[in-house]
Structures are given as C-alpha cells and as structure tokens.
Image: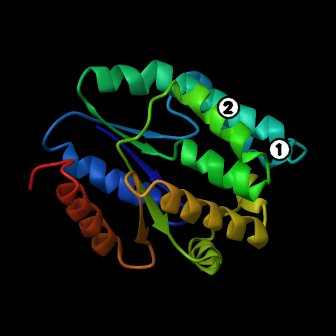
Amino acid sequence: MFLTFEGLDFSGKTTQARKLADRLGRRQKVVNLREPGGTRISERLRELLLDKQHLELCDAAELFLFSASRAQLVAEVIRPALERGEIVICDRFYDSTTAYQGYGRGLNLEAIRQINTLASGGTDPDLTIVVDIPVGEIERRREATGHAFDRMESSGRLFYERVRTGFRAVAQQFPERVVCVDGTRSIDDVHEEIWTLLINRGCIQQ
C-alpha cells in the first residue's frame, strides 16, 4: 500500500504522516519517507532546492530538480518496498509538483503531468491525503514556532493561495484517490479522521 500526504507548508502533514506510520508500524513494516529526500542523491537535491542562497533558481529548473529527486526515490526506495509488500508513506509526492510548480509557478499543467508520470515511473499512490489549512494559518504557525522560511516558503502569500487552489483542484479531479481533511483541528482529531478514512476505504482492517 502506497499512501501520500500533501498540503501547504505548516499544514501538519508531516506530523500526520509520522503518526500514521507509527500506528501502522505496529501491524507491519512501514517505510516513512519525505520529498524531496529519502536517498543520498535526493537529499542533496533537497539541500539545493530549499537553500535561500539559490533564489535565482528558475521555475523550470525547480520543476526538474524536484522531479529528479522523485525519480531516484521511486527507483531506489519506493518501488522496491512496495514489491516487498511493505506499506510506504510519503510526505509529498507528485501532487505537490502539480500544486506548487503548476498552479503556484504557472508552469504548463500538461507538461507537468507528463513529467510526473516519467519521474514516478507510473507508480501512483493508493490514497493521497491533503491536510488543508488557510494560507493565513501558515503565518500564524510560523510566528508561533519562530521558524525561518526556506527558499520555497519565501514565495509569498499569493503564491500559497494558488498552491492551495491547486491541491483542491487535484482533489476534485481525482476524488477516488485524493481526500482533503481539515488541518485546523487538533492533531489527534485529524489523525482519527485519517484512520477512519483508511478503514472505510478498505486500506486497513479495524
């Protein structure tokens, strides 16, 4: 089973991915990953993509670097784990590329679809959970944690509004795979909704 978590930065998706991995891990082997990252090469690309010293990175280069990181992760980790019958949970996957580089940066959506297919090697998630929060909540949570923005997080409010629109559009286009949950609630409430969702979808036994 291949599960992915999506959402804006500070949405809580990483926390939810970890909580689900911990709970499912009591039943069987779980591989918990993040994008970009998860392999030696992918982590190097992550450093490049998020470093604010590289603000000159053009939109197309950003797209290809994220996709290169994904291609390596799929080939080296995700596909082998799935073939072994393990559960794979990934914090971001190709829907982030559609939302961030497509809707956020304004790159051609059809070109992104083809690049996503190539980078993923046709490996599609069984279920994608979008942890949805208003853009204003990003600012509130950042101030509460004192977190400094990385290169991607420095893109501005209007950019994040477009990205949020992108995630919602993906959920509307692929309702059989993508589900939005309200990320403004408590961590435990969101987790229990996700757990119930997995049961109702037949992904896990109660």
Q: Which residue is mark 2?
A: 45
Query: What type is the residue that disc 1 sits on?
Result: Asp
Depth check: give the residue in front, 58 or 176. 176
Give percent across and percent down for residue 74.
48, 26
* Residue 5 versus residue 162 in the image, above or below: above
Residue at figure coordinates x 49%, y 27% from the top left: 122
Query: What type is the residue that disc 2 sits on?
Result: Leu
Give percent across and percent down for residue 186.
35, 77
Residue at figure coordinates x 61%, y 23% from the top left: 41
| Mark 1 neighbour class, 10 Å CA radius: few under 14, some 14 to 19, many 20 or more | some
Q: Is residue 55 left or right of residue 112?
A: right
Q: Is residue 184 left or right of residue 170?
A: left
Q: Is residue 24 left or right of residue 105?
A: left
Q: Which residue is mark 1?
A: 59
Depth check: give the residue in front, 46 or 203. 203
Give percent across and percent down for residue 12.
46, 64
Q: Could you tell me which secondary element the residue under label 2 belongs to? A: helix
Report which quarter residue 106 is drawn in. bottom right
Separation of marks 1 and 2 at Cα, in angstroms = 15 Å
Residue at figure coordinates x 24%, y 68% from the top left: 192
